[in-house]
Amino acid sequence: MSRVRIVIFAKAPLPGMVKTRLVPTLGAQGAADLAQRMLTHTLGQALAAAVGPVELCVTPSPDETAWQSLAVPATVAWSDQGEGDLGTRMARAARRVTGAGESVLIIGTDCPALDAAHLRRAATSLQTFDATLVPTADGGYVLLGLNRFHASLFEAIEWSTDTVALETRRRLGQLGWKVQSHPMLHDIDEPDDLRWLPEEWRAPAHEHKCEPSAK
C-alpha cells in the first residue's frame, strides 16, 4: 500500500489578501488573524493524524517573507502552488505526489471541523477505494484523496460554486473509480459561516468586528 501524503493548500494570512468575504464582519486584520488560526489548526490536525508526510503547498512562494512568522515544525515539507487557477494548482500537486508513488490527501485550511480523526478515516479509505471525498454544505469539498491522478478531476470545473463536489463525483464515476464520500462538513467562507467556528474561537473572532464608518 502506498503511503499517504497530506498536502495542505494555504494562502499567506495577510490582511486584505485572505478571507476577503469576511472583511465586512471581522475587518481585514481580523479576517487575516482567523485565517492564520485556521491554518495553524489545520497543520496541527494533519500532524496529529500521523498518516504520513505533511506538506504545505503555499502561495506566495515559501521563500516570501510572509511565511517567516509562521512556526512550522521542521518535519513539514514546503512547496509552491505555482501559477494557474485552483484546478491547475491542485492538479500539479496531485500529479507530483501520485507520480512519486504516494497517495495524496489534498485539503485546504477553511474547515476547523476537519480534524485528525477525519484525516485518518480518509487515509484508511484509500486502502480500498481509488478516491475519497469530504463534501461541504456549500457544494464544494474540503478534502480530496487520490491513489492515482487524472487531469479530468481538475479541468474546467467552476471552482467556488455549489457544483464542485457533484461534478467531481460525476467525473470520478466516468472514470470508473471506486469512491468513498464522507459526511458533509462546513467551511468558513462567508459571514454566516462564522457560526460553525469552534465555540472557543467565536468570541475572539468577533472582537475584530468593524464599526460602521461615517459617510
Image (spheres, helix red, strand yellow):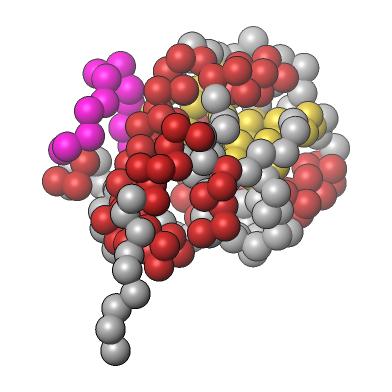
| Residue 71 visible in the current orientation | yes
> 201 or 76: which is nearer to us?
201
Looking at the image, residue 142 lies above or below residue 75 = below
Task: Report whether 179 appears left or right of 41.
Answer: right
Which residue does the image show at 35% across and 42% down from the upper left? 204
> 77 or 22: which is nearer to us?
22
Q: Quadrant of the N terminus?
A: top right
Looking at the image, residue 190 lies above or below residue 101 = below
Secondary structure mostly taken by the magenta-highlighted segment of the chain: loop
- Where residue 149 appears, as percent x and y from the top left, is 63, 37
**How many numbered badges does the structure rendering display?**
0
> 49 or 215: which is nearer to us?
215
- Where residue 41 appears, as percent x and y from the top left, is 41, 30
- Where residue 125 appears, as percent x and y from the top left, is 72, 19
Q: Is residue 72 magenta?
A: yes
The stretch of residues the image draws in magenta is 68-80
Which residue does the image show at 29% across and 89% down from the upper left? 215
| Residue 94 visible in the current orientation | no
* Residue located farthest toward the bottom when viewing the structure as drawn: 215
Task: Say which quarter of the image contains residue 18.
Answer: bottom left
Task: Say which quarter of the image contains residue 103.
Answer: top right
Which residue does the image show at 63% across and 57% down from the upper left? 155
- Where residue 30 appears, as percent x and y from the top left, is 31, 53
> 40 or 166: which is nearer to us?
40
Task: Report whether 25 appears left or right of 211.
Answer: right
Q: Is residue 44 magenta?
A: no
Task: Say which quarter of the image contains residue 17.
Answer: bottom left
Which residue does the image show at 63% across and 37% down from the upper left? 144
Task: Report whether 186 appears left or right of 58.
Answer: right
Task: Report whether 65 appears left or right of 204.
Answer: left
